[in-house]
Image (cartoon, rainbow, N blue to C red):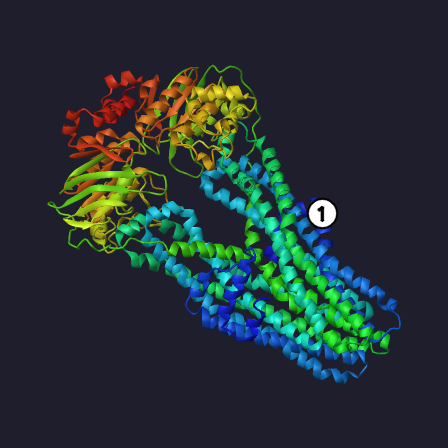
Amino acid sequence: MKGFFATFKNDHWVMPYLRRYRKLLALVLFLGFMTFFCGGALMFNSGYLISRAATHPYNILMIYVPIVLARAFGIGRPAFRYAERLTSHNWVLRIVSDFRKRLYQAVEKQAVAIRQTHQTGDVLSILAEDIDHIENLYLRTVFPLVIGWLLYLFVVIGIGYFNWAFGLLMLVLLGVIVLVMPLLSVAVNGRREFQARQVQRTFYTQLTDAVLGLGDWLISGRRGDFLEQQDQPIDEIATLRRADHHFQWWRNFAIQFIFGAAVILIVWWAGVMFTHNQSEANWVAAFGLALFPTVEPFSNMSQGVSEWPVYQDSIKRVNRLDENVPEQVAQTEIGTLTDLTLDHVKFTYPGAERQVIDDLSLALHPGEKLALLGPSGTGKSTLLKLILGDEQPTSGTITLNGEPIEKLQEQRAQLFGVLDQQPYLFNTTVMNNVRLGNLNATDEEVRQAVKAVELDDLISRLPLGYQTQVQEAGSRFSGGERQRLSLARILLQDAPIIILDEPTVSLDPITEQHLLDTVFSVLKDKTIIWVTHHLAGINHVDQVRFIEDGHFDMQGTPADLYQKNARFRALYDLDRGR
Amino acid sequence: MGYFKLAESGVQPVVLIKVIAFYHLLRGGFFVIDQRVFKFPGVKPAALMVGILTLIQAIMIIIQAQYLATAIVQLWKQQPLETIVFPLAVFAVAFLARHLLTLLKDWLFYPFVEKTTKKLRKQFMAKLFDLGPSVVAQEGTGNVVTMGLEGIDKIQTYLMMIIGKVLDLSITPWLVLIYIAFIQWKEALFLLAIYPLIILFMIILGLAAQTKADRQYAGYQRLSNHFVDTLRGLPTLKQLGLNEQYADNVYQVSEDYRKKTMATLTIAMTSTFALDFFTTLSIAIIAVFLGFGLMNNTIQLLPALVILTLAPDYFAPIRNFANDYHATLNGKNALTAVLDILQRETPTDRELLPVREPVWQADDTVNFSHVNVAYGDDAATLKDINFDVHGFKKVGIIGASGSGKSTLINTLGGFLSPAEGQISVRGTAVPHLDQKAWQRSFVYIPQAPYLFHASLRENLAFYTPDASDEAVNAAVARAGLTDWVATLPDGLATQIGEGARGVSGGQAQRIALARAFLDDSRRVLLFDEPTAHLDIETEVDLKKTMMPVFKDHLVFFATHRLHWMNEMDYILVMDHGQIVEQGTPAELQQLNGAYVRLRSEMEGATTR
């Protein structure tokens, strides 16, 4: 229970929406209540109807009202239920739209931070799943619970109206079903659910690990070990499942047991209460039958609530998202680029000991082209992050036209174009993807850009041409083609500085060569910073710098270095296959 | 009702279920049961038992209704309270018995379900191992893992539900109906007549919803994936300066999705509505019928009340069934998917190659003759591969992307089986290289060797879990990892792999090499572009470590880094799935054909 309130203490993902859409929410609850009310009322009314009819009234009109009511309730129940389902789904989907926007904005603000601590794909799927969970929290827990309580209150007050003492008894008895049982479910199942999730997670990691490394398992010939490794979680899951089921079965039985007792008590009470004359006695059947349809909503409450721990996790996680929003720095703007200057830049990741960037200075002027080389882990990627303003130097400054980069973040897309290892293509048409570079570009301008990156032929030959879907993550196209499409996007973006972050890493040499030729010919007027892992295409640049342990270690024009530097020459020859 | 008679004649429940399934199948696939369920061992006795319990339960339902009605009628007649003690007591006993039977059914049936799912899971794991990485890659890693976890969970739910529900559906309503028929045949006839009508309406509306949903499915799928797609592409959006304005797009798309979903739901829910409408209205109509009957004195209150109390129980099984229809459908699909995997053929004849230590020796030969390999439907295939290699040769495989280098390495590793042609190893003809003995002869080193989520030591000694500490340390030293291991907090016990400590690409290659050092009996090395993503300096270092190992090993080395070719004894030049040239580097140089062309093209890439 404590955990329950703690979860909502700083909540701004669940409660605010209950408030914002309260009218629709009230409608959902009303419709839900009416569904079960009609169910109960139908039996109540029918019980009365036949009892009254059995007294042989001399005129059909005497039972006319119950006859009409029977039909009304009979139609009312399914109609209300249908309406309730539609309204509740509509309500939840409406919230989902809000959620998605919010989640997007939260992730957008912290994109850099999130990528540092998690594997991007993972965290995003988890967050997307969280939204589904909150969606289910409403549909499977909140609505049934509140509707169940409304019904409970109605029944208790209804009976209390005739006899407050008996009403009180029902309050306690049914209270066990609608209050104690759900709480018990959370307490017992909650812990188990937690355990089950942990086992599931271990199993998931282990199985993924085993499947990804299947080739090695196969070669190792350790079939027995492979199977044995999976046995433990399989057995653990089975044990937890069994315990979970046993609890559910006994709980459902207990609910039925109490419910049965309530029915007997009501019949008994009706016997005491309504047997003074025949017209009173006609009500006995009504009370005796009316309770039966309520058992379904009552027992659903416990089931919905036992899923709470799953939802709780999700609510906590999305709420944590909004914390630690990075602070904003006052922004400014610059005109035409005159220089990009790094002045004694040092950088250490927060909490880390090793200085990744150690006193780097560099000045680039419009149109200059720089290649950065060095073994992995020497700070190439970090340097790019610093230049883009995703990270701030621990000391030293990085400026454009004298303005520090952190003050130019709003103008960033007009200043920098980035082509990285795996540029993302969105699951839409080629036309839309390229146009993302400049939303105001005409179809003709998009086509020109695609022509410049030499893809116009290929795309025009496709049956749907520029309207071809690129499919998930651009899988319709090869690695080299995806890079070219992104390059077209950058051409439309038309920023003065282009960052190339190992764009050819997974391409074969011939594809790589063609791509680099295109890149440097279409970007000939731009300032280029190119991080590369080998020397293919190095003659395209006018300056090469090697980073080693955070500082520049050799530098010069490619021709110069080849002549004067033995190490460069050796690497260069090696790359050419000598 | 075609199967009504069967229920009484005591036919074995399994047969009964099949008949019902078929009946429903004929009526538009309303019913969801995979025939293979009946092949699980132990299903028949378990189902028989549940069937018997369901029968007893149906009797309890009737007794319960009968005695509750009796008690109420006594009160209606204004009899003293003592007269209702007995009927209420019987009601209480029957009511309890009814729900205890539910508990008992679950309790007795669950062991079968648990055993079956556990066995399925284990069979699934074993099958994965036997199918090997290529098949798994085709299915998709994520897909396979989900199938093994959630898929089998869904199957468990499905098995737990399906048999009990079907038996309930085929026993309870009819027993109740017979009892009602004994009391008042007209009402029974009405209830009987309404039943097929309900099913008919559900099918008609269900099909209508299905057609509409099918039509919307493509757009629907795209919209629902749009959100994750956007999140994944966020860095790109940021680079393009669209990150902020895209938030509204996210909202708009989600709203479109909502509208589309609601349109589908409105129709999809009509079939549940129809069921609900007919069942509830039937009860109302029965009540009114009974009212008239009572007025006309054609029926007494007690039987009327019994019928009214029983009517909801007549409809309960079909309602339960419809409520869980979607869970059932999911379970059935999962079951079909898992069983399909289990029924996949695994390579046979895996022990043709005789075991010998070491498997590969200096005077052994491997020979490919007219080998064709088909991979997937349209992906890279190998056509007419011929070569002959013996002893500890170093064989370079060179070609552009998609020329079939990886497919050839995968065939050499036995991960893919040839469709045609002849392979012979040490003079033994084998249909494929998925030979147990062959697998113990090689080490496979791809572009990114997989590191298990385990300690560094376990990763190093993966092929030889019993290796001594000295052997491991020696291998670490030969692979040039000693300095790196010294920097690790727990040395060899440090956890590496996904989610644990990061290992650079160069180090991963060295760990894979160390595996080869540790197992001296593995004399074949298969490399698939091991250095493609490494920077040139790391590659130079790694090459220094690798070269000594090549000496007394048979090496197959697929790469597009040209300098490796200088170290090779023999080269296979590949293009579009074929070997277009082969020979020693000197021979190929002299030939001045594909090899020279490819080399100069690739060299051009670096010199330009």
- Per the image, label 1 sits on a secondary structure element best described as helix
Q: Amino acid at mark 1?
A: Leu
Per the image, the residue denoted by label 1 is A24
Q: Residue A254 lies in what quarter of the image?
A: bottom right
> Which residue corresponds to the image point at 29% horizontal and 51% vertical from the top-left?
A218
List x then y, in percent, for residue B381: 30, 39
Nearer the observer, A339 or A199: A199
Q: Give the vertical position of B99 relative to A571 (above or below).
A: below
Residue A202 can be seen in this image? no
List x then y, in percent, for residue A556: 31, 18
> Which residue corresponds to the image point at 18% horizontal and 30% vertical from the top-left?
B566
List x then y, in percent, for residue A317: 54, 47
Q: Give the vertical position of B389 relative to B104 (above or below).
A: above
Q: Report the chain holding disc 1.
A: A
Crowd around label 1: few <14 · some 14–19 · many ≥20 (10 Å):
some
Q: Give the vertical position of A95 relative to A251 (above or below).
A: above
Query: Quarter holding the N terminus of chain B?
Result: bottom right
Q: Residue most toward the right?
A: A58
Residue B347 can be seen in this image? yes
Query: Quarter holding the C terminus of chain B?
Result: top left
